[in-house]
Image (cartoon, grey):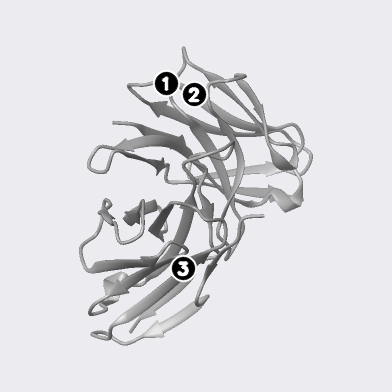
Amino acid sequence: DVKVTQSSRYLVKRTGEKVFLECVQDMDHENMFWYRQDPGLGLRLIYFSYDVKMKEKGDIPEGYSVSREKKERFSLILESASTNQTSMYLCASSSNHGHSIDTQYFGPGTRLTVL
Amino acid sequence: AQSVTQLGSHVSVSEGALVLLRCNYSSSVPPYLFWYVQYPNQGLQLLLKYTSAATLVKGINGFEAEFKKSETSFHLTKPSAHMSDAAEYFCAVRTLYSGAGSYQLTFGKGTKLSVIP
């Protein structure tokens, strides 16, 4: 089974802090994604990566950056956390090959609260 | 651009009743469509997907969905609801992200299903 893990289930940070959210997948997937999920808004794509060291902005990249130094790991960085970044953050990965092509596999999520 | 619309942010059904969750899509190309389920405080799990083969797609936990091109719909059904089906359900369409030339998923806003004993 595909396994996507996220470093924390719950995180509480203060305004202005630098926050790192880590995501690791164990299926050698080429693509990795970061979403935020808010009630009534569904999932919104923040950034994605289709290869090591490659990144592309999604629909709401402002206030975020990402890093992908290794194929299995994709980090989301909040340079200076703000209260409007309080949300559920979901990481996902997908493959470009095989019967599960384009199917995204999700981690359990990190619920971030910024005070 | 591809998009999906889920009709009804909340749906309630009685245990044992039919579950029907609606999804309409907009796509300029033959779509790939997905249904995901999210249980409380968990990530999303794939229920089923349509990739232009059979129009009736069977998924996990007794769910199925039918692709209807004429109606641009991909509604999710289950004949008999169980208490464990209470969750949030998301419809998604594969979208070409032109900037990167790669495919993404564009999600609907979700439908929360409640099952009444």
Label at residue B9? none
Res. B8 in view: yes
Q: Secondary structure at mark 1?
A: loop
At x 31%, y 71%, the residue is A85
Helix, strand or loop at label 2? It is: strand
CA distance separating discs 1 and 3 = 32 Å
Q: Are marks 2 and 1 on the same chain?
A: yes
Q: What residue would you read off at disc 1?
A: B30
Callouts 3 and 2 on one subunit: no
Residue A81: image location, x then y, percent: 27, 78
- Callout 1: residue from which chain? B
- The nearer-to-camera label among 1 and 3 is 3
Residue at image coords 42%, 42%: B108
The percent position of residue A34, horizontal first and vertical second, equals: 38, 59
Q: Please, what is the three-letter code of the amino acid marked with disc 3?
A: Cys
Q: Are marks 3 and 2 in contact (CB under 8 Å)?
A: no
Horizontal and vertical percent for residue B53? 58, 20
According to the image, label 3 marks what residue?
A23
* Disc number for residue B73: 2
* Disc 2 residue type (three-letter): Ser
Give the residue type that dot 1 points to.
Pro
